[in-house]
Amino acid sequence: YSLTSIPDYYGIDALLTEEHKLIRQSVRDWVESFVMPQIDHAAQNHTDIPNLMKELGQIGALGPYIPVEYGGSGLDQISYGLIMQELERGDSAVRSAASVQSSLVMFPINEFGSEEQKRKYLPKLAAGEMIGSFGLTEPNHGSDPGSMETHFKDMEDHYLLNGAKMWITNSPLCDIAVVWAKNEEGKVQGLIVERGMEGFTTPETHNKWSLRASKTGELVFNDVKVPKENLLPGVTGLKGPLSCLNSARYGISWGVIGAAIDCYCTAVQYSKERKQFGKPIGSYQLQQKKLAEFLTEITKAQLLCLQLGNLKNDHKATPAQISMAKRNNVNMAIEIARESRQILGGMGIMGEFPMMRHAANLESVITYEGTHDVHLLITGLDITGINAF
Ligand code: TGC
Ligand code: FAD
């Protein structure tokens, strides 16, 4: 499909600045030239995309809102959202790589790190010369991270870290991991663990049917001696990791619009070209209903994100507002991926078309960063004041 067919049904572009549009265009062009030609091969073969992080660094997609003095671009939240949207039009694995590095690794170092930590890590992370991962989820504690078992002891001249994290994006590739663990008082704190520290291993998780172009693995800590200067000094408690999730979930709300757009545009084009019973399938009401509903849902999601971005720029977006957008938009995208695949009939299962890949990827996206159900419970709590977890 032509890039000019990407929908802006409500003229939302008029609400963006010239800078927003330029940023979006440059990421869109990069996705066309770098991601699209190799994404099917990477996903089919369950390999990562070579040089992805350095490329993302070069186009400014790592920590776009991190201050310029630490290697970021100092951009606003709408720019961040638009970048995520364009990346996920390519593949959720590409957006995931940028989400984790930006919101889950650079964000906590920038918000809660010491000046030395910021200077040591942020510029390299922004350039993609260093890859970060984020360890919150454990084998026995996913939706309920407050019950985590990973813990560290103060040994006077270092901390001793023990435990394990599971389902960690980029763990097999990471140079550093921001790890959330309990101190001796049972309070959650963040530690920067570096590859090469004795007792730290990152086994890969194989055989995924989803996010196949992204590496996932474990972070295992067996009596790891972590230097004291690697503790994030600025936060104690679960609000540390959860505030990183606010930023990542916001980016995902935008990102999945990109996946939905890729499916929608492909389906519109196919429905006009493919003929059955002597007419294009797009001339039949059943197919038009699908296309009309896709465009309606994409437009609603775009408006939701734009206003959430405005709130975020003003530091007014609440965690519950972000949960609503993450839940709504991921569900919107997965429904469009599944239904649009049907419009392509048998061709819809093929790698030449993006639907199966997006649909399979979105099964992870609807689960990570808080499941569909957990986000509903967060909205329920916000409405009633009653915790139903
Ligand atoms: P609760 O008692 O409600 O809260 C504990 C403390 O945290 C504060 N808080 C938040 N702070 C900032 N932002 C938020 N969104 C916050 N939500 C809660 C809260 O105020 C409290 O602070 P304080 O000072 O009183 O201690 O916590 P809970 O134990 O009842 O759990 C709440 C719940 C279930 C909502 C939360 O734990 C949750 O969101 N669970 C889902 C877990 C999750 O999202 N995991 C994601 C792992 S990372 C990931 O998936 C990366 S994938 C990346 C990729 O590849 O793109
Ligand atoms: P569980 O918490 O066991 O949930 C199972 C089911 O029970 C879900 O449907 C859930 O909604 C439901 N449920 C749970 N509690 C309740 C309740 N109180 N009421 C009703 N229903 C409930 N984590 C990281 O820390 N870092 C990463 O980089 C990372 N990357 C990931 C990459 C991939 C590809 C995947 C799949 C996951 C990743 N995760 C990561 C982990 C992800 O955040 C968790 O999988 C997610 O939070 C859910 O946890 P769980 O899988 O243990 O499911």
Image: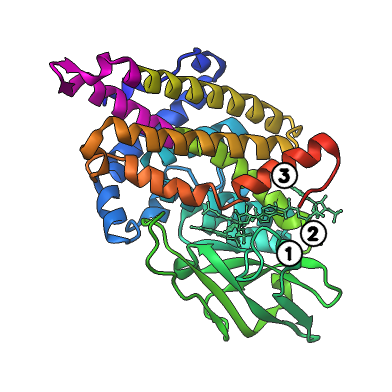
Quadrant for the N terminus, please: top left
Mark in the foreground, 3 or 1: 3
Q: How many marks?
A: 3
Q: Is residue 149 visible?
A: yes
Residue type pointed to by label 2: Val
Q: Residue 155 at x, y = what percent?
A: 78, 86
* Residues marked 2 and 1 touching at CB (< 8 Å): yes
Residue type pointed to by label 1: Leu
Its colouring scheme is rainbow
Task: Determine which residue is flagged by label 1.
Answer: 232
Crowdedness of circle 3 by 10 Å Cα count: few (<14), some, many (20+)? some
The answer to whether 288 appears left or right of 294 in the picture is left
Quadrant in which residue 381 is drawn: top right
Ligand 2 occupies quarter:
bottom right
Task: Determine which residue is flagged by label 3.
Answer: 377
Task: Determine which residue is flagged by label 2.
Answer: 235
Ligand 2 contact, mark 3 (Cβ < 8 Å): yes
Mark in the foreground, 3 or 2: 3
The answer to whether 32 appears left or right of 239 in the picture is left
* Residues marked 3 and 2 touching at CB (< 8 Å): no
